[in-house]
Amino acid sequence: MTDPLPITDPQEESRPGRFLPYPVSTLSAAIIPADLSSFRSRGAAGVERHFRSQMAELRSQYVALIDQFNWNKLVYEARFGFEPLTGETYHLYEMGDGFTLSMIEPGRWPGKKWIASLTLTSGGHWEPVAVAENFDLRSLPMMQG
């Protein structure tokens, strides 16, 4: 058995707005735009939170990088009369008008102000292992600016 042919209205096929996604007649159903204010405020708040979090993380990484740079600058500008070995820990002392890197452990060099103990990494960077409680790297005049 064959399907019956659909009954079509010739006027329906010639109607101009038949396939348009919006109404073309005043008799068509009203289109009421959705209220997007809550969507926008939620989206904006979420995006702002995300970017603030990323900026805080980047700031933290930036500060850590500057501190690493300043430790390395401090050590490489200090006085020392030996070639440090990779993986070994050395000790930084404040002496008069500058800093000195030494193999002498803190407490074994009386009268000298110990600043920090640092290890030389394989990449040639100095990593602080221990820092004197009263020492603030960022307070040094050469580290500001």
Image (cartoon, rainbow, N blue to C red):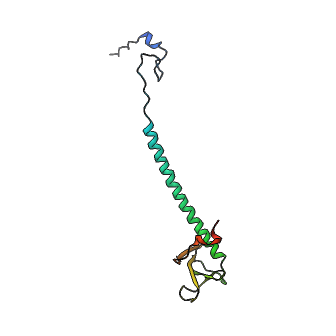
Can you say which quadrant of the picture contains the N terminus?
Answer: top left
Q: Can residue 69 be seen by looking at this rendering? A: yes
Residue at x 56%, y 65% (from the top left corner) = 64
> Hey, which quadrant is residue 128 in on the image?
bottom right
Can you say which quadrant of the picture contains the C terminus?
Answer: bottom right
Asked whether, in this view, residue 27 is left or right of residue 85, the answer is: left
Residue 18 vertical position relative to residue 33 in the rendered view, above or below: above
Pick whichever, 107 or 103, lies toward us.
107
Residue 90 vertical position relative to residue 54 in the rendered view, above or below: below
Pick whichever, 134 or 48, lies toward us.
134
Residue at x 58%, y 68% (from the top left corner) = 67
| Residue 111 position in % (x across, y down) | 58, 88
Residue at x 55%, y 76% (from the top left corner) = 135
Q: Which residue lies furthest to the top in this view?
A: 10
| Residue 75 position in % (x across, y down) | 63, 76
**Total label count?**
0
> Hey, which quadrant is residue 30 in on the image?
top left
Residue at x 63%, y 74% (from the top left corner) = 74
| Residue 17 position in % (x across, y down) | 48, 17
Asked whether, in this view, residue 61 is left or right of residue 77, the answer is: left
Q: Can residue 123 be seen by looking at this rendering? A: no
> Hey, which quadrant is residue 5 in on the image?
top left
Q: Which residue lies furthest to the left in this view?
A: 1
| Residue 3 position in % (x across, y down) | 35, 16
